[in-house]
Image: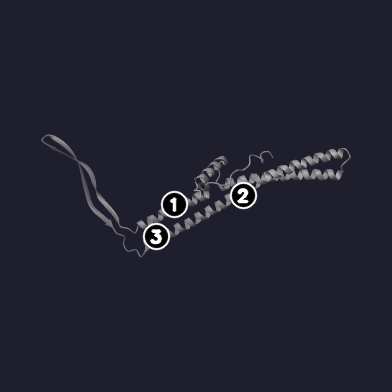
Amino acid sequence: MERAQAAPVFIASVPAQTLTQRPDVFAAERDVIVASAQVGSAKAQRYPRLTLSGSVGALRYSSMGRETNLDTWSFGPLAVTLPLFDGGQRKANVVSAEAAYAQSVSVYRGKVRQAVREVEEALVNLQSTDARKQDAAVATAGYAESLAATQARYGQGLASLVELEDARRNALAAESAQLSLGLERNRAWVSLYRALGGGFEPDRLNADATSSAADQPRP
């Protein structure tokens, strides 16, 4: 139970850039980049292509017993390749590439929205368990004291067995609730870890979130 009641949670927000370490978000981002490059390639196929042939070399000649090296440039004709009529195939390729790009952007946005939702839910659960932790600790301590007092009264013949069992049941219920809250908090940490793609450090998240908030313009 001591591990479940570790340091309280102070994470109120997470830098958005942290989401890019999620495998699904990273893969979707790469798909957008690839699709964008394919659009550019498809468009380039519709333009003329220039081809320059030739060579660059050195010329050596001898005059009056002296040799001289000169750089020479020899260029051939400039070839221009124009796209021939292809029945609209190149245009169709551009349209198809643009459609694939739009689809990849849509998928990427969906992955980001899902990631944001999962992170928000995990943060809410963490904050909720942290807010209830103090009340649970107070309740557990109170019922434990009540049980001790009832046991003392029962030993003196001032409390019935029913009262003693009620006090014992209340104390056990409070302790069980506190343990359940600790497990819920641990599950929230695991959910946040998964939502962020793993490998995050709470202290670093706090520092990054504080820095991001400080950089925001104030009204």
Residue 119 x/y as whole percent: 57, 49
Q: Residue at x 79, y 45 (%)?
A: 169
Image quadrant in which you'd find residue 154: top right
Q: CA distance from mark 1 to mark 3?
A: 16 Å
Q: Which residue is mark 2?
A: 124
Q: CA distance from mark 3 to mark 2?
A: 45 Å
Q: Between residue 18 and residue 124, name the one nearer to us.
A: 124
Q: Earlier in the sequence, mark 1 or mark 3?
A: 1
Question: Which residue appears farthest toward the left when viewing the image?
Answer: 64
Q: Residue at x 87, y 38 (%)?
A: 155
Q: Would residue 175 be seen by someone viewing this image from the given angle?
A: no
The N terminus lies in quadrant: top right
Residue 69 x/y as whole percent: 18, 38
Q: Which residue is mark 1?
A: 33
Q: Which residue is mark 3?
A: 94
Q: Secondary structure at mark 1?
A: helix
Image quadrant in which you'd find residue 100: bottom left
- Closest to the camera, between mark 3 and mark 2, is 2
- Closest to the camera, between mark 1 and mark 2, is 2
Q: Secondary structure at mark 2?
A: helix
Callouts 1 and 3 close, C-beta under 8 Å? no
Compared with 112, 65 (above or below) is above
* Mark 3 neighbour class, 10 Å CA radius: few under 14, some 14 to 19, many 20 or more: many
Residue 148 x/y as whole percent: 80, 39
Q: Between residue 145 and residue 193, name the one nearer to us.
A: 145
Q: Earlier in the sequence, mark 1 or mark 2?
A: 1
Q: Label 3 is placed on what type of residue?
A: Val
* Mark 2 neighbour class, 10 Å CA radius: few under 14, some 14 to 19, many 20 or more: some
Q: Would residue 66 be seen by someone viewing this image from the given angle?
A: yes
